[in-house]
Amino acid sequence: MKIYFPIEPGKHGGGGTFLNYFYNSLDGTEFESVSNIEEADIFFAMGAQTTLKEIDKILELKKKGMKVVFRVDGILNIRMPEGLERIKKMQEIADVVIYQSNYIKSEAESLYEKHNNALVIYNGVDLEMFHTTLKKPSKDFLICEYSQNPCKRLQESLGLMKQLIDIDSNVKLTIVGKFASDHVAQNFGLPQENVKFLGRVEHSFMPSILREHKVLLFPNMKEACSNLTLEAMSSGLMIIHKEDGCMPELCGDTQVHWSFNIRCIVEALAKRHTDERLEGRKRVEKLFDIKNCIKQYLNIMRAL
């Protein structure tokens, strides 16, 4: 079966990470990718990336037998009306719609007509790439962010760090990502000796960065299915997160809930011993293995 991808592997953040995994799993025998949509048996669309012009072409090719698989991600993070309209149109023409979490499925069904062939497949993690280590993490807290979307709640993470530093002046924070120059110039409003800024890094460097740290600060709202959270859990980090979006589905009761009472967070972290920190890894192994994730997609495509 020949599959056409409307976006290039390796692009577009977490969606690009998933597509890279999927693209590399195709062995060219049963499934292969094609660069010409006219040759495709399956059009594999992701989020709001498909243009209205492409949708017209898809409708034309569907009449000739092409099938459409539509993977829906962060609907509520899309701030442009045309993006929401493209998702609506893709849901209407798709043969199967795949949501990244029950949370995003519920949100989509509150906005659009319910699709009669819809299901949930969570994102997956490369368990060999993102693994734990017997070596004790040498660094404290980590923030990773590549978007200025207000749902990412950067200021809440920085505010929490200020409180943590007030309690223990030796606490250290590493920040990874692309940020406005004024944030960097002002050291994110934190004491210089407590912050290390790495800037933007390639995805291939993230496993070693994660394994060096104890805790990921993740106050994000309206997440569809956070790759970063799963990668951090797989690497043995504790996650301080909001009970919002997909996070309860991903973390279960293995992580630490965000609280405005800083003492509650400090006490919760102190109670987490090494064995408990690895509960997140066990959860990822059971539910979020990228190999199982890809297998589910391919099984769906076989059945079309």
Image (cartoon, rainbow, N blue to C red):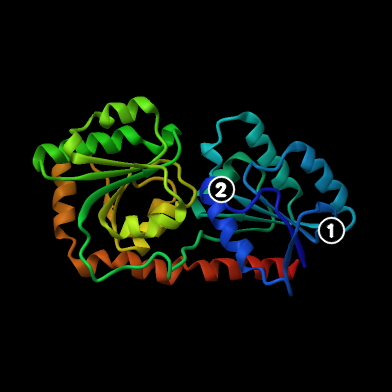
Q: At 22% across and 38% down in the image, what residue appears?
A: 160
Which residue is identified by label 2?
Answer: 73
- Spot occupied by residue 23 in the image (x, y as percentages of width and height): 63, 62
| 237 relative to 138 in the view: left or right | right
The image's mark for residue 185 is none
| 99 relative to 94 in the view: left or right | left
Check disc 2 and report its element: helix, strand or loop: loop
Check disc 1 and report its element: helix, strand or loop: helix
**Up-down: is 18 above or below 291?**
above
- Spot occupied by residue 295 in the image (x, y as percentages of width and height): 60, 71
Q: Which amino acid does label 1 sit on?
A: Glu
Separation of residues labelled 2 and 1 (CA atoms): 26 Å
From the image, which quarter does the N terminus lie in?
bottom right
Q: What residue type is labelled 2?
A: Asp
Determine which quarter of the picture holds residue 163. Answer: top left
In depth, the one of 88 and 19 nearer the eye is 19
Q: At 19% across and 61% down in the image, what residue appears?
A: 272
Estimate how packed mark 1 is, as few (under 14), some (14 to 19) or many (20 or more) residues with alpha carbons within 10 Å. some
Evaluate whether residue 100 shows in this view: yes
Which residue is identified by label 1?
Answer: 39
In depth, the one of 141 and 66 nearer the eye is 141
From the image, which quarter does the C terminus lie in?
bottom right
- Spot occupied by residue 166 in the image (x, y as percentages of width and height): 11, 36
- Spot occupied by residue 151 in the image (x, y as percentages of width and height): 42, 36
